[in-house]
Structures are given as C-alpha cells and as structure tokens.
Amino acid sequence: MLHYLIVNLIPQYKETPFRLIDYVTFRAGAGLITALFLTILFGPATVRFLKHLRATAPTRLEGLIDEKLIDRAKDSTPSMGGLLIVASIVTSTLLWSRLTNQLLLIFLGTLIAFCAVGFLDDYMKVAKRKRDGIPGKLKLGLQCLISFLALFFIARTPEMGKNFWELTVPFIKEPIWLMPPVIAYIFGILVVTGSSNAVNLTDGKDGLAVGCTIFCVLTYGAIAYMTSHKVFAEHLDLHYIAGASEIVVFAMIIAGACIGFLWYNCYPASMFMGDTGSLALGGIIGLISVLVNQEFLLILVGGVFIMEIGSVMIQVPVFKMTGKRVFKCTPIHHHFEKLGWTETQIVIRFWILAGIFALMGLATLKLR
C-alpha cells in the first residue's frame, strides 16, 4: 500500500529518499521491523485479552505422558496467541508489499485460511473444553483443501509456468522429473499439509516452534530472493521467478512477527501460539518451498520439524505392531525431557540444530 501511495502521490519520488520503496531489500527489512514492533507493542494487550476470554485450553499432554512431566502452571497460560502473529503479518504485508502481485495475494489468503482452521481447532479446545479440538479427519481435510486451492492458483500464475511441474532435489542442477499434474498436486499437498502439521507438533515447549520457524523462514526467504534475482538465479541454476520478490518481503515479515512473539513465548511463556499460529506458519513454509522448487530441501532446512513429526510417524505404527516404543515419548522433545533435559536445554539445543540445518540447506544451493 505504501508503495502504491508513494508512486502515485509523489511524481518525483525517484529523486527523493522515497525511492527506497522500489527496493525489495528495503521493504523486506522495513516489513520485518514493523511486524516485530507490532507484535511486541500489542503483546501485553493480547495476553490480557486472551486471559479475559479464559482462552486456556486443556492440556493435550494429559494421559499421553507421565504426569510428572506436565507443568500444571501452564494450564493458566492463554493459547491462541497465533492471532497476534497473523494480525501483525497481515498488517505489515498490507503496508509494505505490492498488493498487485498475484503470488503475494495467494500466500496471504493461504495464511489466513490456515489460521482460520487453527482458530476453529483452538476454539473447540477453549470453548468446548475438547482436548483434541475438531475431529482429526476434518482438520486434515480442510488443510488438504486449502493446500490444493493455493497450489491450483500458483500453478496458473504467469511467473510459475512449467516450473510448477518440475521436481528438483538438492545437489543436482537439473530437474529430475516433469511431474504429471495429478502427481504434482498430490506431492504439493503432502508438502504443505505435512509442514503445517510438523510445526504444530513441534509447538510443545515454550519458544520451541516459533524459534525454529524463524530460522526456517529466513532461509526460504533468502532462497526466494535468489530465485527472484535473475543474476543470482542463473549463477546458482535456480528457476527465475520474478514475482517471488514479494514473497521475500512476506517471508521477512513472518520472521519479524515470530521474533516479536518470541518475546512473550520464551520460557516461561506468557501465551502460546496454539494451532491458530502453528498451522498457518507451517503451511506457509511448505508453500514457499513449493514455489521455489525446493521441497526436498525442506527435509534439511526444517530438520527439527522433520525430527518431531518423524518420531511420531515411527513410534505409532511400531507400537501398534510390536507393543514396544522406539522413543520414550513422542514428539521427540518429550523423549529428551524423559532423559532429564530441562525445558530450556531442549529449546536452546533444538534452536542450535535449526540454525545448523538452515546453514546446511543454504550451502546445498552452491554444492550442485
């Protein structure tokens, strides 16, 4: 919006400092700072508002892990803090992005849609006191529907072209397969929905999910910048996607909102993001990976999220078939909790891993 106003209301803006509005890097930085500022500024009011609504969900860990591992003090901590994250992202995006960009509008709509599903799930936990929220099949179905619609519109943008159908893997320059449309959509839905649920499963310790999200979204924001820059794209043998420049701004805004939210979500947390935030953030990370044709790289960049969801995917079938547990408890952060790690140790060490995975992911772009 600011770009539109400056360009149309200041005819000679290119001869003034306002010319910075044309630079993606400037708007990305300004958007990050704005989102961070908004989240920190309105954090206390959000906490008071959620407490007034008694937006505390019954613990989903009750009956799943040892009672001694459940911190009952957190039962009074309000959930649904994801509303603050998403509101800051939407506001900052409207201020600093070019709203004529089709890809941006698709991403913004997807963020809001995933947030709505998460909000519905959290509402059922808060208002109806249902520990599991909405039925799992309904939740998954809505996620798949949102993912399909986002992918459908992305595939039809002029910027994507045949890139959408190409499957790429780390360390190999050329695409390894031109996927049929049905396979491409199924694969994309699995990536976006899986990413959404992986972040959701990681959101079990104060600051864990949001901290790892910062590393992940900054990495994919950097990759999106390279794909939107013709020289960098050619040098690194990436698909050039001109419209991805606005996704760079969007990604930085998400990082800023997450950093601001961490101020209130670090131990001991003043509020939790809940499914309202985790489903939305995870879904957008997955969607960015599809946009830049780096879906398999998400296994590395989002390594902590893969550890979390992978531990559950291993534990459940093995336990059903053999009655034995591979891990002491899942998601895997509870395994380390049972080993005696404190909450702070788990979170900080997982952040370190997230940072290492992010750097390794960036390095693969050159090692091809």
Image (cartoon, helix red, strand yellow):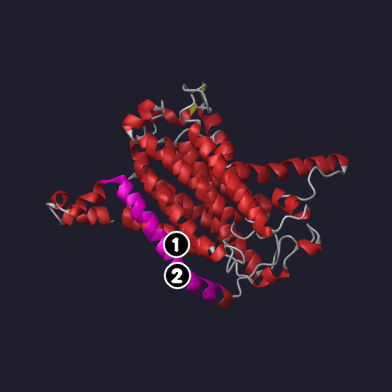
Residue 42 disc label: 2
Q: Residue at x 41, y 65 (%)?
A: 38
User: Which numbered tag is attached to residue 171?
Assistant: none
Q: Tell which of 156 and 94 is nearer to you.
A: 94
Name which residue lies at 55% across and 59% down.
276
Q: Amino acid at mark 1?
A: Ala
Contact flag, marks 1 and 2 (Cβ < 8 Å): yes
State whether the magenta stretch is mostly helix, strand or loop: helix
Q: Nearer the viewer, residue 314 or 206?
A: 206
Residue 185 in view: yes
Assign a secondary structure to mark 2: helix
User: What residue type is disc 2 on?
Assistant: Phe
Q: Which residues are magenta?
A: 23-50
Position of 359 relative to 84 (above/below): above
The Cα atoms of the two marked residues, 1 and 2, are separated by 10 Å
Residue 35 falls in which quadrant of the image? bottom left
Q: Is residue 27 magenta?
A: yes
In the rendered image, residue 288 lying in the magenta stretch gets the answer no
Any part of residue 98 in sight? no
Query: Which picture quadrant has residue 264?
Result: bottom right
Residue 240 placement: quadrant: top left
Q: Name the residue located 32 percent from the left edge and 51 percent from the top edge.
A: 27
Mark 1, residue position: 87
Of the pair 116 and 174, the residue shown nearer to us: 174
1 or 2: mark nearer the eye: 2
